[in-house]
């Protein structure tokens, strides 16, 4: 009986594996088709000055307008996109749209997300600058969001890249700060404009189950202050979180409290978006 059960289990396991493999292959094929039909767009979420609530910029967040499942967030497909290398093509489609939006929406900066692998791909900085020029968007209004992994992967190369971009006015933000290696000794060597404090720490600020969050956020802000780097609290959902961040000296905030990611109105509509 034990043997029978064992066999049943492994058959079930095989079946699940097969189903998952099929799902991933379908998703990859779907993604390829979506690239051909340019089915991706950036949604925009405001980043505010915590002192007065003024909107200082927006983060462009990728959405896939899937024909059946509607707008899909990156979590639904980024794994397949990265494994297949397709995410880089998706990124360029989304960046172009974000740059086009910059030319219509004239206030503040726009930040785009760049995965470590994409950041280290050939001619990334040159391509980015060329696309900005093509579209007629001002590089000085663009920020790129990278993670610590992108810096540590190949530090000399990352440094060159960031310097090339900064020389043209494109500043770098360090995304999800605190969740990676946080190799502090590295940080001061890179031209980083701001740290984005990961939302897991911000969520813990008014959650008594996570008393360590306050200490961690305080430490990150002290570090940023020492290095003269700006700070953005991510995933701010409550007024209490915003107030704590502000009191601790965090300068900017982003989260559902201030505004959710929203699609831009259609091109041609020169409205408020
Ligand atoms: P991220 O860059 O850390 O972006 C922040 C994520 O937090 C976004 O999820 C955003 O919608 C969500 N968020 C914002 N405010 C709140 C809040 O108050 N509460 C909560 N619970 N969540 C909040 P999203 O849009 O699903 O994006 C997930 C991740 O996908 C991003 O994390 C980023 O790493 C990646 N991503 C987004 N756009 C792109 C892109 O164009 N290219 C690439 N390669 N990756 C992207
Ligand atoms: Mg980001
Ligand atoms: Mg983040
Ligand atoms: Mg994240």
Image (cartoon, grey):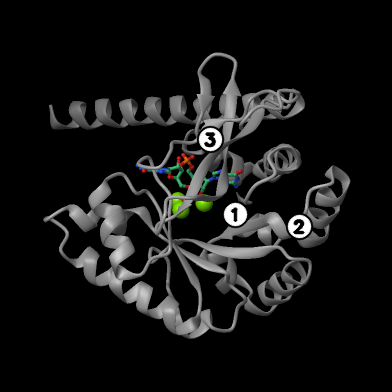
Q: Name the quarter where the N terminus is drawn.
A: top left
Task: Inspect this view and state whether residue 45 appears.
Answer: yes
User: Mark 3 = which residue?
Assistant: 77
Q: Are marks 3 and 1 in contact (CB under 8 Å)?
A: no
Task: Inspect this view and state whether residue 122 appears.
Answer: no
Between 28 and 114, the one lying in front of the other is 114
Considering every residue shown, the one lying at the far front of the view is 52
In space, the residues marked 2 and 1 are separated at their CA atoms by: 19 Å
Residue at 40% from the left image edge and 45% from the top image edge = 255
Q: Nearer the viewer, mark 2 or mark 3?
A: 2
In space, the residues marked 2 and 3 are separated at their CA atoms by: 29 Å
Residue count near mark 3 (Cα–Cα under 10 Å), binned few <14, some 14–19, many ≥20: some
Residue count near mark 1 (Cα–Cα under 10 Å), binned few <14, some 14–19, many ≥20: some
Mark 2 / mark 3, whichever is N-terminal = 3
- Relative placement, left or right, of 56 versus 197 is right
Tell me: is circle 1 under 8 Å from ligand 1.
yes
Considering every residue shown, the one lying at the far top of the view is 68
- Provide residue 130's location: percent of width, then percent of height: 86, 53
- Provide residue 138's location: percent of width, then percent of height: 78, 53
Q: Nearer the viewer, mark 2 or mark 1?
A: 2
- The image quadrant that residue 141 belongs to is bottom right
User: Mark 2 = which residue?
Assistant: 139
Residue at 61% from the left image edge and 65% from the top image edge = 172
Residue at 59% from the left image edge and 15% from the top image edge = 67
Mark 3 / mark 1, whichever is N-terminal = 3
Residue count near mark 2 (Cα–Cα under 10 Å), binned few <14, some 14–19, many ≥20: many
Q: Name the quarter where the C terminus is drawn.
A: top right
- The image quadrant that residue 27 belongs to is top right
In the picture, the disc for residue 115 is 1
- Provide residue 245's location: percent of width, then percent of height: 31, 61
């Amino acid at each position: 009986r034990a043997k029978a059960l064992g066999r049943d289990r492994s058959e079930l396991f095989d079946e699940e594996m097969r189903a998952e493999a099929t799902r991933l292959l379908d998703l990859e094929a779907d993604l390829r088709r979506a690239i051909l039909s340019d089915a991706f767009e950036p949604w925009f979420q405001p980043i505010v000055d915590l002192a007065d609530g003024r909107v200082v910029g927006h983060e462009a967040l990728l959405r896939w307008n899937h024909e059946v499942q509607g707008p899909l967030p990156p979590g639904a497909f980024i794994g397949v996109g990265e494994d297949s290398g397709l995410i880089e093509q998706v990124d360029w489609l989304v960046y172009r749209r974000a740059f086009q939006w910059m030319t219509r929406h004239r206030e503040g900066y726009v930040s785009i997300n760049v995965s470590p692998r994409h950041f280290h791909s050939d001619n990334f900085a040159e391509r980015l600058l060329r696309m900005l020029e093509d579209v007629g968007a001002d590089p000085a209004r663009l920020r790129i969001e990278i993670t610590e992994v992108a810096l540590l992967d190949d530090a000399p190369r990352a440094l060159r890249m960031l310097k090339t971009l900064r020389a043209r006015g494109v500043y770098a933000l360090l995304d999800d700060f605190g969740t990676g290696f946080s190799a502090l000794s590295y940080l001061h060597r890179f031209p980083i404009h701001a740290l984005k404090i990961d939302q897991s720490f911000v969520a813990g600020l008014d959650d008594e189950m996570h008393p360590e969050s306050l200490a961690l956020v305080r430490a990150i802000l002290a570090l940023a202050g020492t290095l003269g780097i700006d700070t953005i609290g991510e995933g701010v959902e409550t007024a209490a979180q915003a107030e704590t961040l502000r009191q601790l000296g965090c300068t900017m905030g982003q989260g559902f409290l201030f505004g959710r990611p929203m699609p831009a109105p259609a091109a041609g509509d020169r409205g408020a978006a």
